[in-house]
Image (spheres, rainbow, N blue to C red):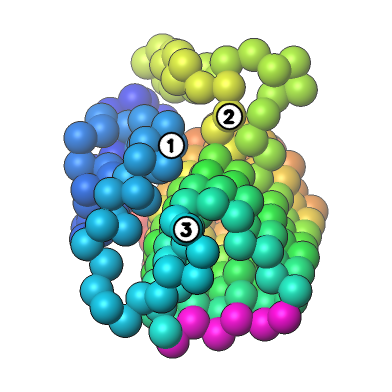
Amino acid sequence: MKKEACTTKKVFPELKAPYDSLLKDTLYPWEALPKIKAWIKEVQKSLPEDFNEVKPGVFIHKTVKLYPNVYLGENIILMEDCELRPGAFLRENVFAGAGSVLGNSCEFKNAVLFPHVQTPHYNYVGDSILGEYSHLGAGALTSNVKSDKTLLILHFEDGEIETGLKKFGAILSDHVEVGCQSVLNPGTIIFSHTNIYPLSAVRGIIPGGSIYKDKNTLVKKRGEE
């Protein structure tokens, strides 16, 4: 895939508020990751009255379903009809869109979930953006730091891009299905309507409308061009 195919407009072609204010000034979507903290703070300033500030810097819509034993850290927004199941661990800088599920024993840090994202069981989402209706199967993880701790470089057909980021998990477009116990390695980008087989170790750029079976087997879904 070439660099031009991986711009913000290609990964998220139909941005709506408030996500557009996070991504509108970026050429590539990963440029938004260091901006998440400040963006959440800015969005908090204009939240309507049906949000409760349950502790300083943590805003929860009145329709959120909050189970026992949930940890809410710092700088968090939970939009309407979110569901936080027992043991959910929200560290800091987390935005969860309307109707999202943050499941039991799942951890979140510097993460943006678009509406209706499903992370139901034993997931880690760090330094990542998950598009609308994306779903992580049980035990699926975003790995956000390389083992050698070096800055992440993305490789394209027409050259490399130095991201300048040490921490970069995954960026998912809409309707992405990630199978159980898969690992999305640092810098993984998955385009819309793609399915990842369970137990996969994924890295790089995965095109839309595909089925990722393993690193050597990527097929188009029926009906996809």
- Residue 39: x and y in percent read 32, 45
- Whether pointer 2 and pointer 1 mark residues with C-beta atoms closer than 8 Å, the reply is yes
Question: Distance between the Cα atoms at labels 2 and 1?
Answer: 9 Å
**Quick one: SS at disc 1?**
helix
**Comparing labels 2 and 3, the label whose residue is closer to the camera:** 3
Looking at the magenta stretch, what is its main secondary structure?
A: loop
For the record, the magenta segment spans 63-68
Q: What amino acid type is highlighted by mark number 1?
A: Leu
The residue labelled by disc 1 is 33
In this view, the residue in front, 39 or 182, is 39
Give the labeled residue for mark 3. Answer: 56
209 relative to 119, above or below:
above
Q: CA distance from mark 1 to mark 3?
A: 23 Å
Residue 112 x/y as whole percent: 45, 53
Badge 2 amino acid? Lys
User: Mark 2 sits on what residue?
Assistant: 167
Q: Secondary structure at mark 2?
A: loop
> What amino acid is found at the position of numbered circle 3 in the picture?
Pro
